[in-house]
Image (cartoon, rainbow, N blue to C red):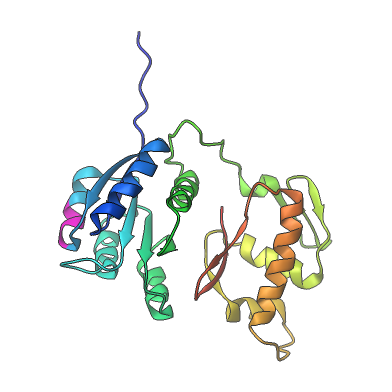
Amino acid sequence: MSPVETVAPLVLIVEDEPKLAALLADYLKAAGYRSDICADGREVAARARQLDPALVLLDLMLPGKDGLEVCRELRSFSDVPIVMVTARVEEIDRLLGLELGADDYICKPFSPREVVARVRAILRRSRLDASPDTKAIDDLATVLRIDEARYTAEFRGQSLQLTPVEFRLLKTLADAPGRVFSRDQLLDKLYTDHRIVTDRTVDSHIKNLRRKLDAASPEQELIRSIYGVGYKLDW
């Protein structure tokens, strides 16, 4: 009996710049993914229904129908992961995109390798990735241990020497992996006495926390910045 062939996940590339779309398709193919390209916002929903993609790379600036409207339309019938690709950095667009159900953002100009890495990370979390070089999925609770009673934390077996503020920051992010927190939301969690601090204080704590996590596991970036919005624990 011949072995059952595994079909590679399909990524629907919604992009009206032909050269960029072809470049993304080439990089995705090299990483073990199939792809299909759609250049008109009015055709995306029908194409998604037909192909049932594992993920949609969705440009915001499209002919016929913009990416935010397309995202809203997709979410009316599908929970497919959506990564928005945009050169527009206005915060309102990003926040609206999150409310509509986008899973991630990538800003132009970008590295195609970064796009592939984001695709792989999201599909890994969704348990849809069948590419041969994907590592086994770790359960977050097995690699990040947080003891609230003792105010201690371990990442991949390494003790993290955290300050109380860093501990609360890590716990807040870890309690909702994938959720994007604004700086103001994080400040509310970090300083319960409502002291007056600037939102950039969060950036400093994030930097220190990243350094300690990186020392325990340098091959994995656990905390990611979402430009113009805030931070999330990427798992």
For residue 19, above or below residue 196: above
Q: Residue at x 32, y 45 (%)?
A: 25
Residue 44 magenta-drawn? yes
Left or right of 93: which side holds 142? right
Residues 44 and 152: in front is 44
Q: Residue furthest front?
A: 19
Position in image of residue 120 (x %, y %): 47, 45
Residue 12 magenta-drawn? no
Q: Give the dominant element type of the magenta stretch: helix, strand or loop.
A: helix
Is residue 48 something that shows in the picture?
no
Left or right of 205: which side holds 83? left
Q: Residue at x 69, y 80 (%)?
A: 201
Residue 181 occupies which quadrant of the picture? bottom right
Residue 88 occupies which quadrant of the picture? bottom left
Which residues, given as a range, are shown in magenta?
42-46
Position in image of residue 205 (x %, y %): 72, 72
Q: Residue at x 19, y 50 (%)?
A: 47
